[in-house]
Image: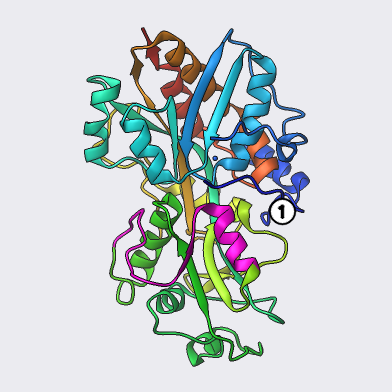
Amino acid sequence: MDTPVKFSRISRAGSAVLVGALALTLAACGSDNNTGSDAGTATASASAPAANISGTFAGAGSSAQQKAIQAWTAAFQGQNPNATINYDPSGSGAGRDKFIAGGLAWAGSDAYMSTDEVTKSQTFCGTDGAIDIPVYISPIAIAYNLKGVKDLKISAENIAKIYTGKITTWNDPALAADNPGVTLPSTKITPVHRSDKSGTTHNFTDWMNKLAGDVWTNPGADAWPLQGGDSAQGTSGVAGVLSATDGSVAYLDDSGVTSDLETAKINVGSAWAAPSAEGAAAVVSASPLATGRGANDLAVDIDRKATADGDYPLVLVSYAIACQKYSDKATGDFVKAWLSYIVSADAQNAAAQAAGSAPLTGDLQSKAAAAAAAITAG
């Protein structure tokens, strides 16, 4: 299981003050009881409405959501002292599987359900099935550990060549061409991927496929499609391998990039962009909802080829997956209150401070709130 890790900074997206300012600007136009000190300062200004919720409720899935869920849990349990929320950041695929099997109140996932998964969810959720509600928007960073190199650019084509074994050392001519004036060592490159089924992997492989399809021919998928290579479970597991391995590179939610690692800029059209909450929010805001979904299913079809000024298309939208109707009233009442809270402005701003994520705003936030409010029980 992916265990909580404490970090020496809030996120690479910027300071808490900067992210708080971002939240205001946008508004104007992971089985642990996650109540650790990471979330303490982030939840100071957030409040969860008391809903007379009592009982113990389990969720699991996305490790990218873990720091945000810590913040949300602290606030919600503070206002609902008879409620206990346990969240296992075991990976998006594991969370979806366990939810569909009826073992969770809700799941967190960095990729929305497939059509087959929606159909399977009817066994647990009834004929209305389950829905995807966006709760967390974050850039995925290309993080690396390379002594002496602080400012690196890696294109989608070159990261795809690294992961497919076509580029094996840091001083490869293709990397040197993207980094004029930077002295790159001959250090062997150690690419690291997620060992568990991961929505972060799904988003990363989808981005490579859309931007470097001649090199990376595999479609987006939760499970890493290639054999071999270094791997680790969960966001913190990948960060740990990176920290311990000179010459390593990996993809992970920006909130999980520890202070001893660097992040590369990626190509966005003819420009280069560093991971940022602003850039992630801009891409999601301009991306359409996926077609063929139910009225309250808010799956986002991310535009990986976005090239507007400031865009950062290597982004994930992380969802809460929930039944539209719960047979158990206590569980249904909890999920409705819990999700209504975490899509609220207070909770989204708390997540921005805790994890550097981009708050839900505008039409997407309104639709998420309506979808949560439509959940029924009993």
Place residue 176 in its image quadrant. bottom right
Is 139 in the magenta?
no
Name the amino acid, label 1.
Gly
> In which quadrant is the C terminus drawn?
top left
Residue at image point 37% right, 38% down: 96
Q: Position of residue 238 (x, y in %)?
A: 55, 60
Residue at image point 23% right, 25% down: 123
| Left or right: residue 151 compared with residue 205 | right
Q: Position of residue 266 (x, y in %)?
A: 53, 70
* Circle 1 SS class: loop
Q: Is residue 253 visible?
A: no
Q: Position of residue 174 (x, y in %)?
A: 48, 88
- Which stretch is magenta? 219-243
The one nearer the camera, 13 or 237, is 237
Residue at image point 36% right, 72% down: 212
Residue labelled with disc 1:
14
- Asked which colour scheme the image uses, the reply is rainbow
Is 99 drawn above or below residue 26 in the view shown?
A: above
Label 1: how many Cα within 10 Å (few below 14, some 14–19, many 20+): some
Is 314 drawn above or below residue 167 in the view shown?
A: above
Q: Is residue 269 visible?
A: yes
Q: Position of residue 126 (x, y in %)?
A: 25, 19
Residue at image point 47% right, 20% down: 335
Place residue 202 in its image quadrant. bottom left
The one nearer the camera, 339 or 334, is 334
Q: How many marks?
A: 1
Is 3 drawn above or below residue 167 in the view shown?
A: above
Is 227 in the magenta?
yes
